[in-house]
């Protein structure tokens, strides 16, 4: 069964850094939109970073812009999320997802609909303490 496999979550203090990885299992990340979503406790899931793997174009939610960086390694079939200057508000479960290939570009984070993403990982927990 095709699905993204996330890793790299953990617990850090405010100001710390983490790097999440998303390995595409059973599908290729080539020339498609890949995204990272976050679900904080008692909040809705939100898209925070997207990358179109064909040309590397990226989009970020305002809440993470300037602190998080999404990237891809086509040869490794992996997407990364580098998270710096972490804050307690960044605490949550982070999910990697692959947009349905019918879409030719990534949507803006605020316009991203979960139903348009074909494959979802099981999530990895990130906890940022004060």
Image: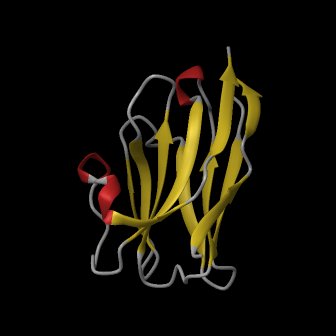
Q: Is residue 52 left or right of residue 4?
A: left
Report the residue at 55% width, 83% height from top: 28
Residue farthest to the front?
1
Image-quadrant location for residue 44? top left
Q: Quadrant of residue 78?
A: bottom right
In depth, the one of 42 and 29 nearer the eye is 42
Residue 54: horizontal and vertical position, in percent? 43, 82
Q: Residue at x 61, y 53 (%)?
A: 122
* Residue 20 in the figure: left or right of residue 27: right
Residue 125, image x and y in percent? Answer: 66, 38
Residue 56 in the image: state x and y as whole percent: 45, 73
Task: Decide which of 27, 112 is in the foreground and name it.
Answer: 27
Name the outermost residue toward the left: 111
Q: Quadrant of the C terminus?
A: top right
Of 85 and 91, which appears nearest the observer? 91
Residue at image coords 63%, 40%? 84
Say which residue appears at 62% left-offset and 33% top-offset: 85
Identify whether 71 is placed above or below 104: above
Q: Is residue 14 visible?
A: no
Q: Position of residue 128 (x, y in %)?
A: 67, 25
Q: How is the image coloured?
A: secondary structure
Name the foreground residue: 26 vs 76: 26
Location of residue 80 (image quadrant): bottom right
Q: Is residue 74 left or right of residue 51?
A: right
Q: Is residue 37 visible?
A: yes
**Quarter of the figure with the N terminus:** bottom right
């Amino acid at each position: 069964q095709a699905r993204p496999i996330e890793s790299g979550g953990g617990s850090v203090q405010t100001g710390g850094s983490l790097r999440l990885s998303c390995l595409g299992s059973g599908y290729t990340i080539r020339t498609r939109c890949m995204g990272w979503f976050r679900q904080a406790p008692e909040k809705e899931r939100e898209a925070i970073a997207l990358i179109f793997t064909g040309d590397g174009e990226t989009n970020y939610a305002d809440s993470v812009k300037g602190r998080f960086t999404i990237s891809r390694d086509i040869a490794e079939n992996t997407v990364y999320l580098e998270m710096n200057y972490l804050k307690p508000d960044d605490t949550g479960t982070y999910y990697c997802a692959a947009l349905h290939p019918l879409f030719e570009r990534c949507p803006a984070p605020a316009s991203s609909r979960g139903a348009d993403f074909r494959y979802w990982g099981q999530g990895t927990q990130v906890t940022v303490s004060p």
